[in-house]
Amino acid sequence: MDSKASTFIPSQAPKVPTQSKPKEKDFLNHVEAYLAKRDGVDKLLKISRYATKIILASSVVPETVLLSRRLKSFESSVGVSRKAFRLGKFVQDVNALRSSHFDSKQEIFLSILAYGGEGLYYFVEQFVWLAKSGLIDAKHSRNLQKISAWAEFVGYIGSISLKFRDLKRINEDEACLDSSIEIAASRGVGCKEEEERKKKLREKKLMKQLSIVQDFADGLMALADIQDGKGSFSDPLLLSCAGLLSALVSTHKNWVSC
């Protein structure tokens, strides 16, 4: 008899796959992913610009000092550079409007205000950049900036209104979850899934609230542009702080999403 045929080979038990915790994203890889995004670089420029404007507006550096002139030159050049990042950005608003699902006529109207206003703003900003870069006659720059500011302001009105509606829905969903958790607790039933959903819902709620704060800050700056810096809320330091707040919120949102 063949020795191999008579050898008993015990069957191996199937390996049970162990659940491994998701690895945390490497910091440098995260930075690379962040900087690969157009908005990532744009918001870093925005932080540097408005931080510089705060220094200039607070008179920390005297105007007679050479550093003050250099900071003004830096702030101006960064402002022009940021406009280049808006090339073609209006397309995202067109696509967002196309892919939106509307529940009411009011939502249609607010979406047109939000996406239409922001889209028009980004579209006109392309020509503002060309005027500031010297390709288009500079005499058109003032009218283009006025149109851009109005479009941006209208866009923020629509965006804030939509986000408040979203926030109301999130609060309603959170209340339903709280009710389900209370019922489950009273019956002695586990509710880990509901707790996890509630955690994600709270994170979503926080991001929505931050987004509203950002829109109010940006809307304030757009209003100041409409009023040519002559309104009640046109103090340079106030606007610079609003710009920095907006930049920090947007940077956090982009960092979390990438």
Image (spheres, helix red, strand yellow):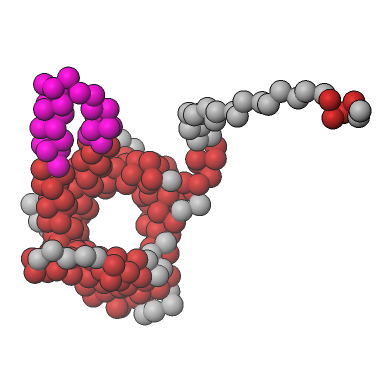
Relative to 238, 192 lies left or right: right
Q: Could you tell me residue 255's position as x and y percent?
A: 40, 42
Q: Could you tell me residue 189's position as x and y percent?
A: 20, 23
**Residue at the location (40% across, 54% down)?**
39
Relative to 24, 104 lies left or right: left
Magenta segment main secondary structure: helix
Q: Could you tell me residue 104's position as x and y percent?
A: 9, 66
Above/below status of 27 relative to 236: above
Q: Could you tell me residue 35's position as x and y percent?
A: 49, 48
Out of 180 and 84, give the one closest to the viewer: 180
Out of 249 and 231, give the one closest to the viewer: 249
Out of 14 and 33, give the one closest to the viewer: 14
Q: Is 140 one of the magenta-colored residues?
A: no
Segment tinted magenta in the rendering: 173-199
**Residue at the location (23% across, 27% down)?**
191
| Quadrant of the rendering where the N terminus is positioned | top right
Relative to 87, 4 lies left or right: right
Residue 144 visible, this orientation = yes
Residue 229 visible, this orientation = no
Above/below status of 52 relative to 5: below
Q: Is 174 one of the magenta-colored residues?
A: yes
**Residue at the location (13% across, 22% down)?**
187
